[in-house]
Structures are given as C-alpha cells and as structure tokens.
Amino acid sequence: MPLRSSAFARQKLCLDFASLKHANLKGLYVSPVPDEPLQWTAVLSVRKGPYASALLRLSLSFPASYPSAPPAITFAQDVFHPLVAPLTTYTLSSARDSGPVDPRSRLPPGGLVLREGFPEWFAEESESEHGDGRREPHIVEVLHYVRLLFCTPELLDAVPLEAAANPSAWHAWRSYRARVLGEAAPVRVDGGGAGREGSAATQQQQPGGARRPGEWNWSGVWEDRVRKVVAASRAEGVLFGGEGGEVISFAKMDDEALASVMPQIEAVAAGG
C-alpha cells in the first residue's frame, strides 16, 4: 500500500470535520484540537441505553497514514465497557497470547477497540484482492459506531470474548443480560470457538483450583460499575473543575442565564 504523507491526512481531516455538520451525531460533540492537526476531542452525551445520562470525554488521535489506518480513540475516565481498556492496563484488542503483535491492535489505557466494527482497517493486505483498494471507513461511520456502542445493547451482545478489551465487563454484561432477558445472551463464536463461553477451556479451573472468570458470580456487577461510571462522569469536579484548558467545556448557568443564550445555541444548531 503506498504511503501517504501527514499533509494528506491533515487535508482529509479538514474535509471530514466539515462533513460532521450534516452527520446528525446526536449527543456527540466534536472539535479539532488547536495546534494539533491530527488530534480531535469529543464529548459523548449518552441519551439512552445502558449508559444513559453519562457524559464521556474522549480523544481521537489520527496517524499520518489516515485514512488508510484508523484513529486511536481513548476515553479520559475509566469506562466499564467490554470494548474499552481499563485505565490501569495496557492491552491488546484481541485475546491472542502468542504470535506477532500488530501495532494497530495495541490499546493504551482507556483505548477503544475498533477492530470489531471496522475489520477492514486491520486486515492483512493478503486478505484483500488489492492491497491499496481496500475500503477506508469514513470518520462519520466511526463516530456513529462509538455512539451506538453506548446505547445499543445488541451491539454489546455481539461482542465475542476474544475481542474484549475488558473481559470483566464482558462477563458482567452477559450476566446482566441473562437476568434481564431471562435467558443467556447469544454468544458470538469466532476463531474456532475462542468466544464460546461454555467451552471446555472456560469451564476448566485454573492451576491451584482458582475459578475462571466465566465461573465467578457477576450478579449486580454490571449495574454497580456502570452506575459509578455515570456518576463519576457527571461529578461537578469533572464537569466544572478543570483548569480551563479543555476545548469543549461546560458552564454552570442558572435558568435566566441559560434563557439568554438559548437563541444563539438554537441558531447554531439550525446552521444559522
């Protein structure tokens, strides 16, 4: 695949950002970072689903080879989600324990797995008929995907264990869904059964007799951890206690002050 310069990536990002005006990204607010042409910042206001009312800050770091390579998306706070790496770990977006590591699969703390939604970005050139003819996802697709991951239970149901950046969140979600639905949530099986929760590998005990995560009691864990995520994201110290360096910031307003600025807000929202 021919290498692209960072100048091409910067130009593409200018066009991509302009296209967001018509993207209808409900609840997702995005801005370029001044003096950092390959960096965006965003706030996700989750309006429904498992994380309803959470306000999550995230950053998008684009490589010089974008859009041939994906952005790195990281969350500023600890988010208990199957596809988000905990802030206390450095992991891979795959459960493989051996073989060469693809740098595109490496996740920083708070990193979001994109491989499940956009496998074309992670496919080897030999897997496509023409290495430089592979489809390149548009950033609008990526942002919509991020939104849906936090408000669409069915997307979480479809995540295989081998893809989870946070296996604890994966098990907790499945336990929660089993109680809500009255039956086990469907398990997607990839890679010869690596994602099969009922496999012999999952059921066997670890050395020393310790139980594997699939055998732990996850009852109530999902609700408790997500409730803490939502509460932490809306804490006054998080929303209003910064040093003023955030590109997207929050302001405390009483009803009178809010009423005075609503006309401008509505005009901007309408494209005026």
Image (spheres, rainbow, N blue to C red):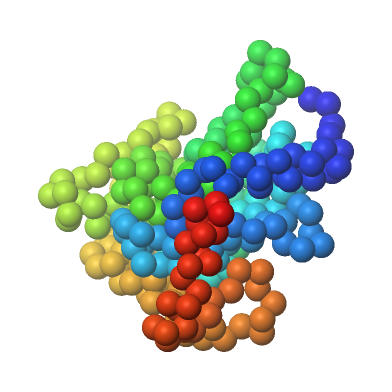
Please state if 108 lies on the left or on the right of 44 as rendered.
right
Where residue 15 sits in the image (x, y, percent)?
Answer: 71, 41
Q: Where 144 falls versus 4 (above or below)?
A: below
Q: Name which residue lies at 36% across and 59% down.
A: 47
Q: How many marks?
A: 0
Q: Which residue lies furthest to the top in this view?
A: 129
Q: Name which residue lies at 82% across and 38% down.
A: 8
Tell me the quarter of the picture where residue 161 sits.
Answer: top left
Q: In which quarter of the image is the C terminus?
A: bottom right
Q: Where 71 falls versus 245 (above or below)?
A: above
Q: In which quarter of the image is the N terminus?
A: top right
Q: Which of 233 and 131 lies nearest the eye of the viewer?
A: 233
Please state if 161 lies on the left or on the right of 3 as rendered.
left
Please state if 215 lies on the left or on the right of 40 as rendered.
left
Where residue 77 sits in the image (x, y, percent)?
Answer: 53, 70
Q: Which of 140 and 169 lies nearest the eye of the viewer?
A: 140
Where residue 212 sits in the image (x, y, percent)?
Answer: 36, 56
Where residue 68 sits in the image (x, y, percent)?
Answer: 72, 34
Q: Name which residue lies at 49% across and 53% down.
A: 270
Q: Which of 76 and 171 lies nearest the eye of the viewer?
A: 76
Q: Where 99 falls versus 210 (above or below)?
A: above
- Residue 226 appears in the rendering: yes
- Residue 200 appears in the rendering: no
Q: Which residue lies furthest to the left in this view?
A: 182
Q: Name which residue lies at 39% across and 83% down.
A: 255
